[in-house]
């Protein structure tokens, strides 16, 4: 009987002091298993103290942007912290300036309006009433692909050209080819500011 009492005391001590997680503090909803923290997605470290904001969802990138090192890497046509600013939105508006057409100078306007269903196209409306579209090659340069448009006073004309734009200035060259009217061509350069 004298050996039984210390043995019972030791076995009681062994069962109550072997909790591997007693002194482990897991942060960010981590769970202690066998003395080590198992961290939820987006967290790592001994105590789940290191957050990878790209994996935890703390950084959200829109419009096809991807999270890299805690920041959004936006696609070609979007900017901003969360890739929620459409690049072409900054160009919307009317630019006042001048047209120089076949060496004749005249004051005029060009209105740029985003085409909502396309990320890389805008409609250009000249002060004269001509309307055509431009396709952007990158964030600041565009082409005016060859297209037939209606003339404000009747008839039609083929237009084509190219240009560059910022949020406050635009410069472009456009050619009007009147094929049905004796193949005359008018070449214009527009330069304007918002």
Image (cartoon, grey):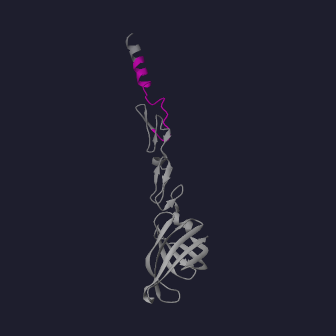
How many numbered discs sit on the rendered protein? 0
| The stretch drawn in magenta includes residue 45 | no
Residue at the location (49% across, 39% down)? Answer: 50
Residue at the location (41% across, 14% down)? Answer: 6
Which residue is nearer to you in this view: 56 or 143?
143
Residue 117 percent across, percent down from the top left: 46, 70
Q: Main secondary structure of the magenta part?
A: loop
Q: Is residue 140 positioned above or below 153 on the image? A: above
Residue 58 percent across, percent down from the top left: 51, 49
Q: Residue furthest top?
A: 2
Corner quadrant of residue 36: top left
Q: Quadrant for the N terminus, please.
A: top left
| The stretch drawn in magenta includes residue 14 | yes
Range of the magenta residues?
9-30
Residue 106 percent across, percent down from the top left: 60, 80
Which residue is nearer to you in this view: 149 or 82?
149
Q: Is residue 36 positioned above or below 84 on the image? A: above
Residue 158 percent across, percent down from the top left: 45, 81
Corner quadrant of residue 8: top left
Q: Quadrant for the C terminus, please.
A: bottom right
């Amino acid at each position: 009987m004298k050996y039984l009492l210390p043995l019972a005391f030791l076995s009681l001590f062994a069962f109550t002091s072997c909790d591997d997680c007693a002194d482990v503090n897991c942060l960010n909803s981590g769970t202690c298993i066998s003395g080590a923290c198992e961290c939820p997605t987006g967290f790592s470290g001994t105590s789940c103290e290191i957050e990878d904001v790209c994996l935890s969802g703390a950084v959200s990138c829109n419009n096809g942007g991807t999270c890299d090192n805690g920041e959004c890497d936006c696609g070609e046509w979007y900017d901003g912290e969360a890739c929620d600013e459409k690049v072409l939105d900054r160009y919307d508006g009317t630019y006042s300036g001048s047209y120089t057409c076949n060496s004749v100078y005249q004051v005029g306007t060009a209105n740029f309006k985003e085409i909502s269903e396309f990320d890389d196209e805008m409609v250009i409306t000249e002060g004269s009433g001509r309307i055509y579209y431009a396709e952007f090659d990158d964030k600041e340069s565009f082409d005016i692909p060859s297209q037939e448009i209606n003339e404000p006073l009747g008839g039609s004309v083929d237009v084509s050209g190219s240009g560059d734009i910022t949020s406050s200035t635009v410069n472009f060259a456009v050619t009007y080819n009147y094929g049905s009217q004796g193949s005359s061509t008018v070449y214009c350069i527009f330069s304007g500011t918002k």
